Amino acid sequence: MENKVILISIDGMRADGVQQCGNPYLEELKKIGSYTFDAQTVFPSVTLPCHMSMFHSVPPSRHGITTNEYVPPVNPVKGLFEQIRKAKGKSTMYYGWEPLRDISRPLSLVSAEYVNAYSAEHTDGILTDRMLRYLGENKDVDFVFLYMVETDEKGGHDSGWMTDLYLDYINHAISNVKRVVEACGDRYTVIVTADHGGHDRAHGTDMPEDMTIPMFFIGKEFEAGKELHGVSLLDLAPTVADIMGVSPAEGWEGKSLLQK
């Protein structure tokens, strides 16, 4: 495919969290791409339901996943991975939380790699290293999903949202984003999002702290320095598909940001 995409999900990253994490690369992200600090996720604001909505462009009320336990949908909607495969594209996935395996269907990935978040310190960085190494050796990959979980597990749940440790994990995650953009930004459009926010040591409610997320879009399709508003988590799959020239699946509810 001519246009390729890397989608990065930073679990539990609040919009005000990334703005307060102290990483100077945030200003560069705002300068080189389009961005938003008021995008909205879906309810319940829980990791697996949010990622199912991210990849299938329907709310949990339609795909049926309302907890972190996967159940087969009664009326399944084709997801982004499946649409890319249908268009003869190649996708890969790097993730730090094992239940995310269910966001893709069998045979829709050419490779996938999982690293347990508690197997080492800064496993988000380990996954980023492995992803960059793989892309250096395999030039024909069209879509890459990189999922970082330490912000949520070790930062939010273990320490608390907006604590110093939580902000430190966001800082590390943004540094990983910098490495991806600098290594691959000439070949891939890079999209960075969160799945949900959080409060205290929890999430899942419809509180603004849980529902409001940041997003960044770096690539030739997006105006540099433009702040976006009215963006939904459901818009990500249609936007990625539009960039790549892939047909959206029947039933997707989100809209491509390229068409707004």
Image: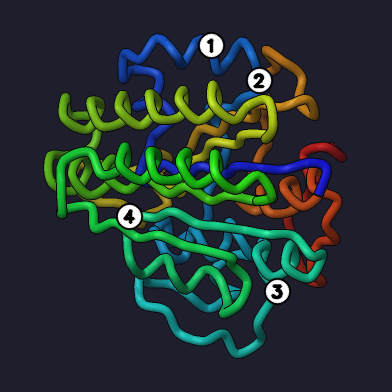
User: The residue under label 2 is which amino acid type?
Assistant: Gly
Foreground pick, 65 / 9: 9
* Disc on the earlier residue, 4 or 3: 3
Label 1 environment density (alpha carbons within 10 Å; few <14, some 14–19, many ≥20): few
Q: Which residue is mark 2?
A: 33
Q: Are marks 2 and 1 in contact (CB under 8 Å)?
A: no
Mark 2 to mark 1 CA distance (whole Å): 8 Å
Q: Which residue is mark 3?
A: 78
6 over 68 or under it: above or below: above
Label 4 environment density (alpha carbons within 10 Å; few <14, some 14–19, many ≥20): many
Residue 96 — which label?
A: 4
Q: Position of residue 56 (x, y in %)?
A: 64, 65
Q: Which residue is mark 1?
A: 28
* Disc on the earlier residue, 1 or 3: 1
Q: Are marks 4 and 3 in contact (CB under 8 Å)?
A: no
Mark 3 to mark 2 CA distance (whole Å): 29 Å
Question: Is residue 117 in sight in this rendering?
Answer: yes
Mark 4 to mark 1 CA distance (whole Å): 26 Å
Mark 2 vs mark 4, foreground winner is: 4
Please give the name of the residue rendered at 72% of the width and 47% of the height, measured from the top-left corner. Answer: 240
